[in-house]
Image: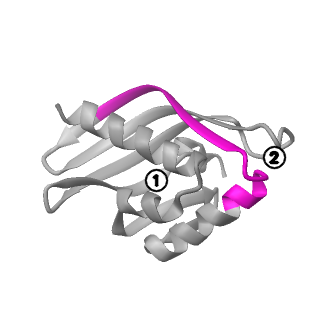
Amino acid sequence: MVSETIRDLIRQADEAIREERFDDLMEFYTEDAVLVLRPGKEAHGKAEIKEAFIAIARYFNNSLVPAQGNMVMLEAGDTVLVLSQTFVEAEKKPDSEYPGERRATYVYRKVDGKWLCAIDNSYGTSLLDG
């Protein structure tokens, strides 16, 4: 089932983030992927996304622990929209200015038979808040 596959891929990506295996993490993204770093700032393509995750890890004092809660997935052919309750914790950075609980949106696309993340937006619709 596609939803279980996507859920497992997100779990594996979260694990790679926790373990700071950034080369492995890039295997979960399309070549032209977009990562929302914060409202108004994005990383485009695997090279920028990798550098962004390295900087994010540094910001969180190398203690970032992302996790997912409830998820809803909408599938249309080779595209899946994932709506997810996302939690971002960092034991060594308890005073982060960024919200620890988010309502994320992810877009997955099937490329050469493999589901890959094309849009990684942990801020979800809160981007509309300005």
- Crowd rating for badge 1 (residues with CA inside 10 Å; few <14, some 14–19, many 20+): many
* For marks 1 and 2 on the same chain, the one whose residue lies earlier in the sequence: 2
Q: Residue furthest right?
A: 95
x then y, percent, for residue 14: 50, 43
Q: Give the residues in magenta.
A: 56-73
Q: Are marks 1 and 2 in contact (CB under 8 Å)?
A: no
Q: 111 or 123: nearer the eye? A: 111
Decide: is 106 above or below 20: above
Q: Position of residue 25 (x, y in %)?
A: 45, 58
Which mark, by number, is residue 34? none
Q: Nearer the viewer, residue 56 or 92?
A: 92
Q: What element carries label 2?
A: loop
Relative to residue 2, is residue 39 drawn left or right?
Answer: right
- Real-space Cα distance between discs 1 and 2? 20 Å
Disc 1 residue type? Answer: Asp
* Residue under label 2: 97
Tell me which corner region of the image, top left, top right, bottom left or bottom right, holds residue 74.
top left
Q: In which quarter of the image is residue 96?
A: top right
Q: Is residue 53 magenta?
A: no
Which color scheme is applied? one colour
Magenta highlight on residue 68: yes
Q: Mark 1 points at which residue?
A: 120
Above or below, comparing residue 25 to residue 1 in the picture? below
Compared with 87, 27 (above or below) is below
Counting the numbered discs, the total is 2
Crowding near the residue tagged with mark 2, few <14, some 14–19, many ≥20 C-alpha atoms within 10 Å: few
**Of residues 26 and 129, which is closer to you in this image?**
26
Give the residue drawn at x 50%, y 50%. Answer: 16
Pick the quarter of the image with the N terminus.
top left
Type of the residue with mark 2: Glu
From this viewpoint, is residue 35 visible? yes
